[in-house]
Image (tube, rainbow, N blue to C red):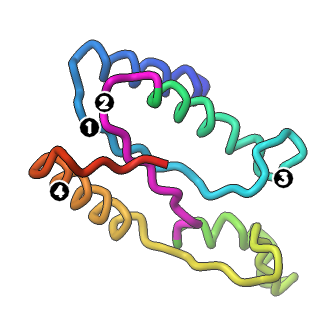
Amino acid sequence: MHRVSQHEHVVRAAREAGVRHVVYTSIPRKDETEASPVYFVASSHMYTERLLKRGRADLYHPAHGIYTDMILFFSGEHLLETKTIYQPAGDGKVAYAVRTDLAEAGANVLLETMANTTIKYSS
């Protein structure tokens, strides 16, 4: 199943269940056009964000950077020969993050939001 279909099913189920707060992890992006080198991933995030914004739930969607476990993906199978890690980082700088750290931060925001419903996070 394509990720857009999966996202549609989850958003619909959340609406039907009356979910009031949503934490949806997205990606940072400067260019939202088809010319963007990350459009193939960004387009599904943009679509899901639009679906969520149409709902009644409070929405918090942090733009996560590159997860540390993706280093192996960018290293490729010929790392020892090429001694090169290919990453989408422009001038070569990247701030990797551990998924569990970002998940904990999102959970803390959600708990804070539930404790004080006047706080609303969205972009």
- Residue 117 image position (x, y, % from top left): 16, 44
Q: CA distance from mark 4 to mark 3?
A: 35 Å
- Distance between mark 1 and mark 4 Cα atoms: 11 Å
In what quadrant of the picture does the N terminus appear?
top right
Q: Secondary structure at mark 1?
A: strand
What is the magenta segment's predominant secondary structure?
Answer: loop
Q: Which mark is residue 112?
A: 4
**Which amino acid does the dot numbered 3 rest on?**
Pro
Mark 4, secondary structure of its residue: helix
Identify the residue shown where x is 48% and y is 73%: 97
Direction from residue 49 to residue 88 in the image, left or right: right
Left or right of 23, for residue 63:
right
The quarter holding residue 44 reads top right
Depth order, front residue of 56/39: 56
The residue identified by callout 2 is 57
Would you place residue 24 above or below residue 78 in this image? above
Can you identify the residue that label 3 sits on? 37
Q: Which residue is mark 1?
A: 21
**Residue 111 screen position, x and y as percent:** 16, 53
Q: Amino acid at mark 4?
A: Glu
Q: Residue furthest top?
A: 16
Between disc 1 and disc 2, whose residue precedes?
1
Q: Is residue 75 above or below residue 43?
A: below
